[in-house]
Image (tube, rainbow, N blue to C red):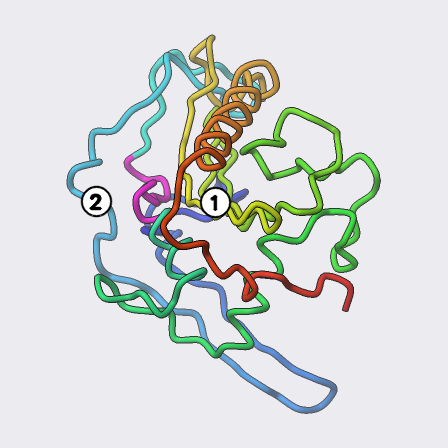
């Protein structure tokens, strides 16, 4: 992932975004960790994306700018990298083609739990009933308010900005011994205007990704396997 700009800080230009905020963790009078402001002098943009522009116009405050939005100064995370990230988290033992995350087994388990926990199972933060099981579970459940099948768990990370919906997920069905990784992104902005808050997430994006997830799930249900997967490591405790 290439991080070039801070979210919700439109007043920051490219140079401002190369500074990090100072950080301090403290418990009562005990200082646990401190890091001063840092500056990155390097050009962190990707050469192949320096001319990347999207849309026919964009909102800047209350003003409509009638030209494409320059994305060369935006954060970048490729779909392939997202899929590989999911694979690295769910199968850290299979890291022959990449460097594994430098975290403990307990930390990995915590990440998996947070990725797959449903809104109604979360205490910190707390989600009210307006957040259904399909909230940020775009594949299979993104377009429904129904409860998720208790035999299914979705370990995923989504993206939701500038008219794009993205999901990268490891989906398991404990009952039918089904597992697969799926990653997809879709642009849902028929009017071509960015930052206007009027995207086609509900009418186009979520129904498409939900159907896509269901389609692959049905294919995996029918696919013959020589060996049934052992999914016991992914049955986690969501009530602690």
Q: Is residue 171 left or right of residue 38?
A: right
Looking at the picture, how far across and down is residue 94, in whole percent?
31, 65
Examine the rendering and report whether any part of residue 162 can be seen.
Answer: no
Q: Nearer the viewer, residue 44 or 240?
A: 240
Q: Nearer the viewer, residue 85 or 71?
A: 85
Looking at the picture, how far across and down is residue 76, in whole percent?
33, 43
Q: Is residue 192 above or below residue 44?
A: above
Q: What segment is highlighted magenta in the picture?
A: 72-81
Query: Where does label 1 land, which residue?
Result: 169
The local secondary structure at tag 2 comes to: loop
Extreme residue in the top direction: 191
Looking at the picture, how far across and down is residue 217, in whole percent?
50, 34
Extreme residue in the left direction: 47
Residue that appears at 38% across and 69% down: 101
Question: Mark 2 vs mark 1: which is more N-terminal?
Answer: 2
Q: Is residue 144 above or below residue 106?
A: above
Q: Is residue 161 above or below residue 228?
A: above
Which secondary structure type mostly characterizes the magenta part of the structure?
Answer: loop
Q: Nearer the viewer, mark 2 or mark 1?
A: 1
Q: Nearer the viewer, residue 75 or 177?
A: 177
Residue that appears at 59% across and 51% down: 174
Instruction: Measure the C-alpha gap from mark 2 to mark 1.
Output: 26 Å
Extreme residue in the bottom direction: 30
The local secondary structure at tag 1 comes to: strand
Disc 2: CA contacts within 10 A as few (<14), some (14-19) or many (>=20): few
Image quadrant holding the C terminus, namely bottom right
Examine the rendering and report whether any part of residue 158 can be seen.
Answer: yes
Query: Where does label 2 land, which residue?
Result: 46
Looking at the picture, how far across and down is residue 121, in whole percent?
76, 53
Residue that appears at 74% across and 86% down: 28
Q: Is residue 235 left or right of residue 76?
A: right
């Amino acid at each position: 992932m290439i991080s070039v700009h801070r979210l919700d800080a439109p007043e920051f230009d490219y140079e401002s975004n190369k500074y990090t905020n100072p950080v301090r963790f403290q418990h009562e009078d005990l200082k646990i960790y401190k890091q001063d402001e840092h500056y990155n002098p390097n050009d962190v943009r990707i050469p192949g994306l320096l001319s990347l522009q999207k849309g026919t116009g964009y909102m800047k405050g209350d003003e409509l700018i009638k030209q494409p939005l320059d994305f060369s100064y935006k954060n970048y995370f490729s779909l392939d990298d997202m899929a590989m990230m999911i694979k690295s988290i769910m199968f850290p033992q299979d890291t022959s083609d990449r460097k594994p995350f430098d975290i403990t087994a307990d930390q990995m388990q915590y990440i998996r739990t947070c990725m797959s926990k449903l809104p109604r199972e979360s205490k910190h933060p707390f989600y009210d009933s307006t957040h259904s099981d399909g909230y940020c579970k775009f594949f299979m459940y993104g377009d429904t308010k129904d409860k998720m099948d208790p035999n299914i768990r979705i370990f995923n990370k989504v993206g939701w900005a500038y008219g794009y919906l993205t999901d990268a997920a490891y989906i398991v069905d404990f009952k039918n011994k089904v597992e697969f990784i799926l990653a997809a992104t879709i642009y849902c902005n028929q009017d071509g205007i960015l930052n206007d808050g009027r995207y086609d997430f509900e009418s186009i994006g979520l129904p498409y990704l939900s159907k896509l997830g269901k389609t692959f799930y049905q294919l995996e249900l029918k696919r013959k396997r020589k060996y049934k997967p052992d999914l016991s490591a992914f049955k986690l405790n969501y009530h602690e």
